[in-house]
Amino acid sequence: MAASMCDVFSFCVGVAGRARVAVEVRFVSSAKGKGLFATQPIQKGETIFIERPLVAAQFLWNALYRYRGEHISPTPEGCWAQQPLRMEETCDHCLRALEKAEENAQRLTGKPGQVLPHPELCTVRKDLHQNCPHCQVTYCSTECLLAAAEQYHRVLCPGPSQDDPLHPLNKLQEAWRSVHYPPETASIMLMARMVATVKQAKDKDRWIRLFSQFCNKTANEEEEIVHKLLGDKFKGQLELLRRLFTEALYEEALSQWFTPDGFRSLFALVGTNGQGIGTSSLSQWVRACDALELKPQDREQLDAFIDQLYKDIETATGNHSCVPNAETSFPENNFLLHVTALEDIKPGEEICISYLDCCQRERSRHSRHKILRENYLFVCSCPKCLAEADEPNMTSEEEDDEEDEEGEPEDAELGDEMTDV
């Protein structure tokens, strides 16, 4: 059962009323499901809406090694997609970075003495950090500590058993880490927080409706998603996770989620609707530096410093389009997703982001389709893909190989054979 429009936009922050006026959810097709459509003109650069996630959680390996988090977006039309980022320790609720920008730079560059200019631009307030008094998990503020306790943490808090390998939740987490190595693309704890949210909720039916709107894949599609997440032995691994999940979190109101079919559906829901969240105090500091009004010489020096810093480091819900008219970001350094127009959007025009990064969008149509099919289980029919429909069905790698072969001399193959010998 789909959630009402009121439920959907009730998770928008600040501009919830604006979202209800400017955007609506429509059914697109059985292949694409639902999509976001503009109901009034949207100007380039305008924030279309900001939303809180239904639930958010750090990836389990990332909680150990401090990378990034993931969340489920409340908008029903599908998955925002974002590439992994190298991140620091984060608030266990809102995923706001807990390291100061300078500490982040020191860790990522491997230079303990790294000093950043303009330290006052870092917004991390360590004096506000709070720990759960029972399990010591860290939050960026009292507000997040209380919000987590109110929504799900009372169920999930292991208390003094946080380091006990026999605690049901610890057994579940260890089993997950044993079958899903980095880079992680989903988290069993996201599913755990969904269950815990329902267990703690006064209005359980509302939350069940919100979560159930994502369950619209066929059994074969779900199995393919789970296979991709867990590998060739996914059936045995899925059953192990289901057993441990049930032992730790069974809830009668969600009994269907704990059956083999229901657990597979829940797993597929997280696999396709999860959104990676990139939060970084260092990147936020860089943006603040970019906004400084400086003399030309000072600007040049600061930009050169930041460029060198990045060298030292070595370093979306709308439907997909290979020519997106909107993009997603997390500019507030927490779990608030900003959707921003890349161009003017007319009333009635669908708002689309790209599930591909910039480099992937420049690859051949066949390569793009291969990535999207393997990761998101659909075939793109955006204007770019339709315009390139008559192009040869070969991947970008094959095209490169073909160009290389055309450029080789006639005896190149013989030379290769002789080299192999």
Image (cartoon, grey):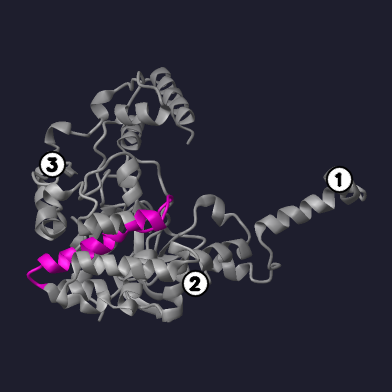
- Label 2 sits on what residue type? Phe
- Is residue 178 in the magenta section? yes
The span from disc 3 to disc 1 (Cα, nearest Å) is: 64 Å
In the rendered view, tell whether residue 36 sits above or below residue 185: below
Residue 133 pos. (x, y %): 8, 44
Magenta stretch, main secondary structure class: helix
- Label 3 sits on what residue type? Asn
Give residue 151's quadrant in the image.
Answer: bottom left
- Is residue 305 in the magenta section? no
Q: Which residue is mark 2?
A: 378
- Specify whether 343 is left or right of 338: right
Residue 252 pos. (x, y %): 15, 77
If you read the primary sequence from the N terminus, does the residue marked by circle 2 or circle 3 appear first? 3
Asked if residue 230 shows in the view, the reply is: yes
The mark found on residue 421 in the picture is 1
**Neighbours of disc 1 within 10 Å: few (<14), some (14-19), many (20+):** few
Which residue does the image show at 21% across and 46% down from the upper left?
Answer: 163
The span from disc 2 to disc 3 (Cα, nearest Å) is: 43 Å
Q: Which residue is mark 3?
A: 131
Residue 162 vs residue 60, the one in the foreground: 162
